[in-house]
Image (cartoon, coloured by chain):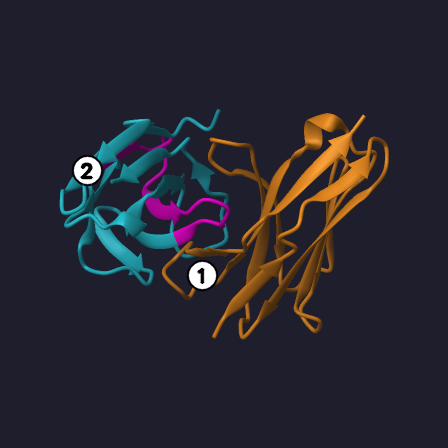
């Protein structure tokens, strides 16, 4: 069966360090992958989208990589700040499957300590 | 803020009852998706509506049904509520169906079934 795995344990890092979050998937051939940020009691907020033919995408302090051979995406936040503390969700998409339907991982909680 | 609104914010129902949740899409968006998010998990796709037609459905029973109106607002109806239906229900709007696109999530409705 299809599975998307994110580290369920919280990631604790010191302010200023680079946070790296992992998203692994099996039995899936996504056309694209998205990363979202979710704060407690709020809906997810879109951060980045990367397509299957792209290796890397950057936006300000954020960087996403997508390795379709390893079936893995890495999400990096450089120069992390306490305001980056949140749960980060990866989501896989296949436009051939119910339009924009996204399949989400369980999320990883990031805690950035001052 | 995404411009997607949901009502009510919180809701408490008892087992066997029926519930209707509402979503107002972001201006210019014709596609609405509904997700269920249990505590500590990622959102799970329920179904999507595109121009008032159901455009795809996840692994949810028929007692989960929906509607999309000409102004692209949407409703999620759940009949014969079960305890496991307790979750955060999220709607997300996007500009079009069938291609990679940012989904804009609302703040969610927290449903508790007793």
Neighbours of disc 2 within 10 Å: few (<14), some (14-19), many (20+): few
Instruction: Decide whether residue B39 is among the magenta residues.
Output: yes
What's the CA distance linking mark 2 and mark 1?
28 Å
Subunit under mark 2: B
Could you say which quadrant of the image residue B18 lies in? top left
Could you say which quadrant of the image residue A109 lies in? top right
Q: Above or below — where is B8 with respect to A37?
A: above
User: Are the residues under marks 2 and 1 on the same chain?
Assistant: no
Give the image location of residue A11, x and y in percent. 72, 45
Query: Which hue is chain B drawn in?
Result: cyan
Give the image location of residue A84, x and y in percent. 69, 32
Q: Which chain is orange?
A: A
Near-viewer residue (B20 or B91): B20
Subunit under mark 1: A
On the image, numbered disc 2 is attached to which residue?
A: B20
The secondary element bearing badge 1 is classed as: loop
Instruction: Decide whether residue A24 is among the magenta residues.
Output: no
The secondary element bearing badge 2 is classed as: strand
Q: Above or below — where is A2 with respect to B33?
A: below
User: Which label lies toward us, 2 or 1?
Assistant: 2
- Quadrant for the C terminus of chain B in the image: top left
Which label number is shown at residue A95? 1
**Residue B69 visible, this orientation:** no
Report the span colored magenta: B20-44
Q: For the point 58% across and 56% down, which residue is it?
A: A33
Q: For the point 15% across and 48% down, which residue is it?
A: B79
Q: How many marks?
A: 2
Q: For the point 70% across and 73% down, which residue is it?
A: A69
């Amino acid at each position: 069966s299809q599975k998307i795995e994110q580290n369920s344990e919280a990631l604790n890092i010191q302010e200023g360090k680079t946070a790296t979050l992992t998203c692994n998937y099996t039995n899936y051939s996504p056309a694209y992958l998205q990363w979202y940020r979710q704060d407690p009691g709020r809906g997810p907020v879109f951060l980045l989208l990367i397509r299957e033919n792209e290796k890397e995408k950057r936006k300000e302090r954020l960087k996403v990589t997508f390795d379709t051979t390893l079936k893995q995406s890495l999400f990096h936040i450089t120069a992390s700040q306490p305001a980056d503390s949140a749960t980060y969700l990866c989501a896989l998409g296949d436009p051939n499957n119910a339009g924009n339907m996204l399949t989400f991982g369980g999320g990883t909680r990031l805690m950035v300590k001052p | 803020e995404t411009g997607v609104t949901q009502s009510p914010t919180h809701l408490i129902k008892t087992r066997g009852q029926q519930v209707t949740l509402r979503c107002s899409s972001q201006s210019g968006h014709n596609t609405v998706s509904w997700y269920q998010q249990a505590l500590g998990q990622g959102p799970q796709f329920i179904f999507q509506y595109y121009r008032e037609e159901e455009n795809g459905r996840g692994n949810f029973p028929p007692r989960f049904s929906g509607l999309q109106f000409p102004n692209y607002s949407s409703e999620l109806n759940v009949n014969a509520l079960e305890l496991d239906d307790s979750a955060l229900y999220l709607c997300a709007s996007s500009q079009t169906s069938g291609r990679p696109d940012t989904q804009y999530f609302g703040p969610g409705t927290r449903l508790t079934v007793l």
